[in-house]
Amino acid sequence: MNSENSKLVIIALGSNLGKSREIIQAAIAHVKFCTDFSVKQSSVWQTTPVDCPPDSPKFLNAVVGFIPQKGETPESLLQKLQDLEKVFGRTPKKVLNEARPLDLDLIAFGKEVRQLPELILPHPRAHLRRFVLQPLSEFAPELILPGQTKTVLQLLVDLPPDETMARC
């Protein structure tokens, strides 16, 4: 793993309410203001909802990665992401994993580890989720997430196939 990857912030984006493709693209444009460097971004993928209420619409998902601005912390970035979700119409949850216009998950912040009520880093289920690993593998296949011993690509290979996930 190169030294740039050891500092990489990984954010997973999802939307299954409203004009999801436009929302994801606009959110990526906003996220670009969180770095002074270039942003790596995946393709957009259509995915089946995971752990969502019955009859939930399909998601569009993407992943971005970037080097954070000097002085940025996981907590300050999380607040920016939560504020951005609100800008796109996210309201407080009424039902776990309900449909939402924008969901931003902080997957990793370099090698930082957090175990707080409001923030767990790395994301505790990212290594099990194809809708995170597949897009992430497009630009960081050799990344080893904190707490893992396998690369993103190796984790992805270990997951059961999911024919319902498609690049769009």
Image: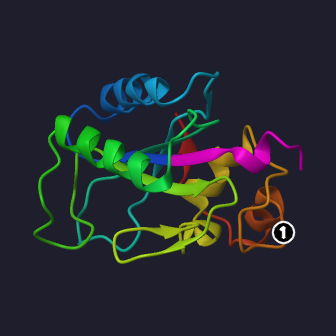
Determine if residue 164 is in view. no
Name the residue tied to disc 1: 150
Magenta-tinted stretch = 1-11
Task: Identify which residue is drawn at 58% across, 22% down.
Answer: 36
In the picture provided, is 67 more to the left or to the right than 139?
left
In the picture provided, is 62 more to the left or to the right than 77?
right
Q: Is residue 136 covered in magenta? A: no
Q: Nearer the viewer, residue 40 or 75?
A: 75
Task: Identify which residue is drawn at 70% across, 71% down.
Answer: 159
Relative to 32, say whether 115 is above or below.
below
Relative to 52, say whether 73 is above or below.
above
In the picture provided, is 167 more to the left or to the right than 55?
right
Residue 60 lies, in percent from the top left, at: 41, 43
Task: Identify which residue is drawn at 82% across, 61% down.
Answer: 151
- CA neighbours of label 1 inside 10 A, class few (<14), some (14 to 19), many (20+): some
Residue 120 lies, in percent from the top left, at: 48, 71
Residue 41 lies, in percent from the top left, at: 60, 31
